[in-house]
Image (spheres, helix red, strand yellow):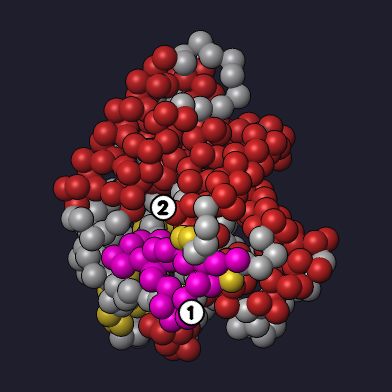
């Protein structure tokens, strides 16, 4: 695209309200934005001004992997956004660019590799089996979210982080307050500060550690002077919060399987396709409301014939990219045989979610345990009566009433 052919005509600004969506239906506003073109302009409920939005798969991957789009430049900018507050503090990994971002991610990388995740697989399976044992001991009906889908990811991320089991409950409470936009910025900020103080103490105690959990790795990196305590705490908070996303993902996953029993029966009959099927469900599930963190263009960049000016804010939609028909034929169809399936549910580029392998492992353990041990598992209420979270940044059922 030559300089002369870049259009200067700005598309209209579309207001994107914070919709409380139920079920796994795709956001109707995002559907309209995708129809309007590869690059549009949006205004979200909080912050100021407008931002660009890219929705096509190739453009999403380009923006997230291009150093001309900076996360760090967002700090102190009142960019239009979904959340009434910014969760990460200055120096937190979500708002860093390489090389600082690379250095910080490297400090915990070992915990999130295939080997690092495999290290806790047996412990995770045992913890899950105990939860399912308890579920089976109680008479149905039960809330699958409260009994299994919420406590299991909390236990797993705490295990990986090196947080003692006795502190799991307070971690969960803080995470819920940080992730909800319903309580207001002050409540979220207080919870984030309390979680940060907790991790500052824990990491400080582990500066000489050689253990493989995340806080030990961070303590050792702080001890060697590779990262600051403030950076380590910011990363720990982000990883702890991110670990609970599995509750919402698996809640949506089981909502699909329980409202589409044909899919569940196929997974029971063909256990060998489960890993591939889970990837397809991860592609299909609308993980979040609206969009996540923005970037700022550091120089003029052309995208799809449109000039993005230096200083402009820009968002990508991974949800939209996962429904790009040029990459995923018949994107509205859940196709367990879809191959290849290069979905971007865990992001792309330097800020790719480090917990992707962990989330896949947890999803596989949940599918194995619940489908195999509860062959009669079904919803205890009509699908439209399943309550979904309101005022949340991440989508998922508030409760999943089941019987068996």
Q: Which mark is residue 383?
A: 1
Q: Is residue 163 visible?
A: no
The range drawn in magenta is: 379-404
Closer to us: mark 2 or mark 1? 1
> Could you give the CA–CA distance between mark 2 and mark 1, rounded to whole angstroms?
42 Å
Q: Position of residue 67 (x, y in %)?
A: 49, 52
- Quarter-wise, where is residue 372 in the image? bottom right
User: Which residue does the image show at 75% across and 62% down from the upper left?
Assistant: 274
Element on which disc 1 rests: helix
Q: Position of residue 225 (x, y in %)?
A: 46, 17
Q: Which mark is residue 70?
A: 2
- Quarter-wise, where is residue 250 in the image? bottom right
User: Which residue does the image show at 61% across and 33% down from the upper left?
Assistant: 111
Q: Position of residue 336 (x, y in %)?
A: 74, 72
User: Taken as a whole, is the magenta stretch helix, strand or loop?
Assistant: loop
Element on which disc 2 rests: strand
Answer with left or right where residue 307 lies relative to residue 390: right
């Amino acid at each position: 695209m030559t300089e002369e052919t870049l259009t200067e005509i700005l598309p209209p600004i579309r207001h994107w309200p914070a919709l409380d969506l139920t079920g796994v239906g795709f956001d109707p506003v995002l559907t309209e934005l995708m129809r309007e073109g590869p690059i549009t302009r949006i205004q979200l409920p909080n912050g100021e001004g407008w931002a660009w939005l890219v929705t096509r798969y190739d453009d999403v991957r380009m923006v997230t992997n291009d150093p001309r789009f900076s996360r760090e430049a967002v700090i102190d900018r009142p960019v239009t956004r979904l959340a009434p507050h910014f969760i990460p503090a200055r120096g937190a990994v979500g708002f860093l660019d390489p090389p600082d971002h690379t250095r910080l991610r490297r400090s915990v990388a070992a915990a999130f590799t295939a080997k690092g995740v495999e290290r806790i697989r047996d412990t995770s399976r045992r913890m899950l089996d105990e939860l399912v044992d308890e579920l089976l001991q109680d008479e149905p009906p039960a809330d699958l979210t409260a009994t299994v889908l919420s406590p299991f990811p909390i236990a797993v991320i705490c295990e990986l982080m090196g947080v003692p089991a006795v502190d799991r409950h307070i971690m969960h409470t803080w995470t819920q307050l940080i992730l909800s936009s319903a309580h207001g910025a002050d409540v979220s900020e207080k919870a984030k500060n309390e979680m940060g103080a907790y991790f500052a103490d824990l990491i400080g105690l582990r500066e000489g550690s050689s253990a493989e959990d995340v806080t030990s790795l961070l303590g050792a990196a702080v001890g060697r002077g590779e990262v600051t305590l403030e950076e380590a705490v910011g990363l720990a908070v982000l990883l702890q919060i991110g670990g609970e996303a599995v509750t919402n993902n698996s809640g949506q996953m089981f909502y699909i399987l329980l409202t589409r029993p044909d899919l569940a029966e196929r997974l029971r009959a063909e256990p060998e396709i489960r890993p591939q099927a889970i990837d397809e469900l991860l592609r299909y599930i609308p993980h979040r409301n609206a969009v996540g963190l923005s970037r700022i263009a550091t120089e003029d960049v052309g995208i799809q014939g449109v000039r993005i000016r230096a200083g402009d804010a820009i968002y990508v939609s991974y949800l939209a990219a996962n429904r790009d028909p040029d990459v995923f034929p018949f994107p509205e169809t859940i196709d367990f045989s879809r191959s290849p399936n290069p979905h971007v549910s865990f992001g792309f580029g330097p800020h790719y979610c480090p917990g992707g392998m962990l989330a896949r492992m947890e999803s596989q353990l949940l599918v194995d345990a619940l489908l195999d041990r509860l062959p009669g598992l079904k919803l205890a209420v009509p699908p439209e009566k399943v309550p979904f979270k309101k005022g949340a940044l991440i989508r998922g059922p508030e409760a999943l009433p089941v019987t068996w």
